Amino acid sequence: MTEHVPALHLTSATVLVTLTGPDQSGVSTRLFEALANHLVEIVDVEQIVVRGRLVLSVLATEPDDVAALESDAHAVGRELGLEVEIEHGTGDNRPRRVGRSQVTLLASQLQPAAMAAIAARIKTAGGNIDRIMRLARYPVTALRLEVSGADPDLLQAELPAAAYEHGVDIAVEERGILRHAQRLVVMDVDSTLIQGEVIEMLAEHAGHAAEVASVTEQAMRGELDFEASLRARVAMLEGVPASALDEVHDALQYTPGARTMIRTLKRLGYRFALVSGGFTQLIERMAEDLGIDYFAANELEIVDGRLTGRVLGTVVDRAGKAEALRRFAAEANISVKNTVAIGDGANDLDMLAAAGLGVAFNAKPVVRDQARTAVNVPYLDAIVYLLGITREEIEAADAADER
């Protein structure tokens, strides 16, 4: 019959055993085998390995014969060539304070000064970094910090300035059960999912590339009404053969990492939507190519095989993008809090604000400044790091598919 271990209370005596040294197979097995000789309860365990160096900490209730437990732990250390540290205290680890957040850092080159500045801001906000883990080393460095004790909204307000000053991207998400739920990812298309702007590529066939590009740039900076600017640009396409749409489609280039992001998140049951101020004649084909679940865009009028210079129906503008996000979330039976929106232009701002996680991706300054999260690395699959997925997990899943 198994002996009963008394329940742990805040005043219960506990012992923390920490082993450090070269990582090797069987360390945890040997330590737990040694602890099994004593009537203790395992309260907490943490283990990390950095550059082949192991740190293994086990917090247990204190046995009647403390000296015997210490002797057994030191014997394990001598056997495996590890340093052993033993601390005595009471109760569990320091309880995690209210305000649980996940802070994700992305950088092409992460400098110590950036980490120092961000850690200082977290401390100033009343937070404590409970755990840090690396999500990726290439093509960018991505770290996840688990923070307690600070209001997530306060962290969101305090951290971006320090991050921007040091050339890193940062995202703050409140930790809770919803982060494990299925999500809907809603993406802008031009200069987000794809490189460049479709309407500018079409304008080359009309001889108005420079004029259209100028208006597009102003609209994306928020200097022009989007619907009015779209109708003005489309008017310059009058007479362009419909076959130009095929040529533009064949010339499209997806942003690096786009397929990887979609493939990875599709494995986890995520849904995807494209919400674009572009045109259904191209968006529909992209959606089919990538396995996208939903899309909303504008429709070019075509008569006798040529563009008329007009748009049919209601224009998908700034407000229309946010409404499409809500509509697709409802169709997918996914809470709006569990949506992710990605965009770069001023017409994406309402959509980014409506989503649970709105990401300004290589965005115009007005968008980057207003969005809660900005990513300025050129890889769209960096978004998966914000969702807690590691580069190793992506590569392992891809390798399994190949097999």
Image (tube, rainbow, N blue to C red):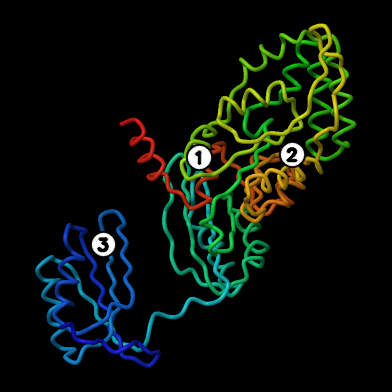
Residue 219, placed above or below residue 240: below
Q: Position of residue 169 (x, y in %)?
A: 58, 50
Name the residue located 16 percent from the left edge and 77 percent from the top edge. Answer: 36
Q: Nearer the viewer, mark 3 or mark 2?
A: 2
Label 3, on which residue? Answer: 54
* Residue type, label 1: Lys
Q: Position of residue 137 (x, y in %)?
A: 42, 45
- Front position in the image: 308 or 52: 308
Label 1, on which residue? Answer: 266
Q: Nearer the viewer, mark 1 or mark 2?
A: 1
Secondary structure at badge 1 equals helix
Residue 45, placed above or below residue 304: below
| Residue 25, image quadrant | bottom left
Q: Position of residue 326 (x, y in %)?
A: 72, 48
What label does residue 230 carry, if any?
Answer: none
Label 3 vs 2, first from the N-terminus: 3
* Residue type, label 3: Leu
- Front position in the image: 332 or 219: 332
Using the numbered discs, state the Cα–Cα distance from disc 3 to disc 1 in whole angstroms. Answer: 35 Å
Label 3 vs 1, first from the N-terminus: 3
Secondary structure at badge 2 equals loop
* Residue type, label 2: Gly
